[in-house]
């Protein structure tokens, strides 16, 4: 349903929370200059070590996206010692980026030698066997970009590895590995899906997928329970939200939003929800 702006005009929003959400996004993605300008304009306090951390993470991210995986690994070991030893999946992905660059540079002999020394040991674990086969298959093509595994050569693939590395470095430093904005969207998505499922059970209707929350303004939650003039969220939904926050392991205090405010912001009137649940249309 379309959201009537009148339903949330009176909802108070804390400017400090919004500013922290924006700053979280800028810091996470290493937008150093923008973050500095933003903190200056808003008066937010930004720790100096965060700025230094951003500069280092940005270099590592850029090296990974450019395909200079060995340099990214070197800097990662300086910034987050022991990280790659503990995270074998990430280490494998970075090494595979270097292998791909050698293949794309037509350095097949060097690529094969690198694979034998650095990648082959991963073959002892079953979960890496198929991945190794995919990468080694690139050597069979004179033009690897035309092989069935061409996606391994794409910028998108390098970006995914770089983003995973960035998150891992943040988590290693006991910093949030996901932005506040991402976690908020997860929370709202879970609330909507859970309430939609309850409505679907009541009316045996098909559950519609959650909308793209970034692209739309209307987060049409369609179920709930009237409670003292407000909307009380189902216990199961609260548990699901807690699971998401605990799985991130880095939720900041301001993200534990008041459930009533979340549901009110959807613009769904409690009276309408009551009518739907009781069948009094």
Image (cartoon, rainbow, N blue to C red):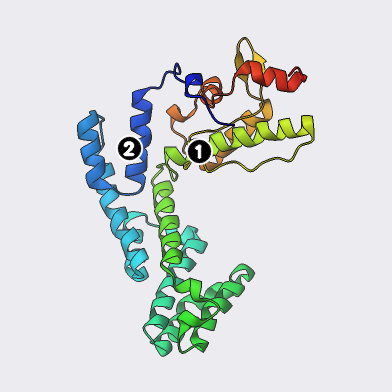
Residue 148 position, x and y percent, is 55, 78
- Residue at 69 percent across and 18 percent down: it is 274
Expressed as whole percent of the image width and height from the top left, the position of residue 248 reads 51, 42
Residue 31 is left or right of residue 280, and the answer is left
Give the mark nearest the N terminus, 1 or 2. Answer: 2
* Residue 174 found in image quarter: top left
Q: Secondary structure at mark 1?
A: helix
Relative to 189, 66 lies left or right: left
User: Is 242 or 26 nearer to us in this picture?
Assistant: 26
Establish if 91 lies above or below 123: above
Q: Quadrant of the C terminus?
A: top right
- Who's the residue at 45% across and 56% down the image? 164
Label 1 belongs to which residue? 185
Q: Is residue 149 above or below residue 232?
A: below
Q: Is residue 101 left or right of residue 123?
A: left
C-alpha span from label 1 to label 2: 16 Å
Residue 63 drawn at (x, y percent) = 32, 65
Say which residue appears at 58% left-offset and 70% top-offset.
128
Residue at point 37%, 56% (across, down): 81
Disc 2 residue crowd, few under 14, some 14–19, many 20+, Cα 10 Å? many
Q: Which mark is residue 23?
A: 2
Judging depth in this view, the residue of 45 and 281 nearest the camera is 281
């Amino acid at each position: 349903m379309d959201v009537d702006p009148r339903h949330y005009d009176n909802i108070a929003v804390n400017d400090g929370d919004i500013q922290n959400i924006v700053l979280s996004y800028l810091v996470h993605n290493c937008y150093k200059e923008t973050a500095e300008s933003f903190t200056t304009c808003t008066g937010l306090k930004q720790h100096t070590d965060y700025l230094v951390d951003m500069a280092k993470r940005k270099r590592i991210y850029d090296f990974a996206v450019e395909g200079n995986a060995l340099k990214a690994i070197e800097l990662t070991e300086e910034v987050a010692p022991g990280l790659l030893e503990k995270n074998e999946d990430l280490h494998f992905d970075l090494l595979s980026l270097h292998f791909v660059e050698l293949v794309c540079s037509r350095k097949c002999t060097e690529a094969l030698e690198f694979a034998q020394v650095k990648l082959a040991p991963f073959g002892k674990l079953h979960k890496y066997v198929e991945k190794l086969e995919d990468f080694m298959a690139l050597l069979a093509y004179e033009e690897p970009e035309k092989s069935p595994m061409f996606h391994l050569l794409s910028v998108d693939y390098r970006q995914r590895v770089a983003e995973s590395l960035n998150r891992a470095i943040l988590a290693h430093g006991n910093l949030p590995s996901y932005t506040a904005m991402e976690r908020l969207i997860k929370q709202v998505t879970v609330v909507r899906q859970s309430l939609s499922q309850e409505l679907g059970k009541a009316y045996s209707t098909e559950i519609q997928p959650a909308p793209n929350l970034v692209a739309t303004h209307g987060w049409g939650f369609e179920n709930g329970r009237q409670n003292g003039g407000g909307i009380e969220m189902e216990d199961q939904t609260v548990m699901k939200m807690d699971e998401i926050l605990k799985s991130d392991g880095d939720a900041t205090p301001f993200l534990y939003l008041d459930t009533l405010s979340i549901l009110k912001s959807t613009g769904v009137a409690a009276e309408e929800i009551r009518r739907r649940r009781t069948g009094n249309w």
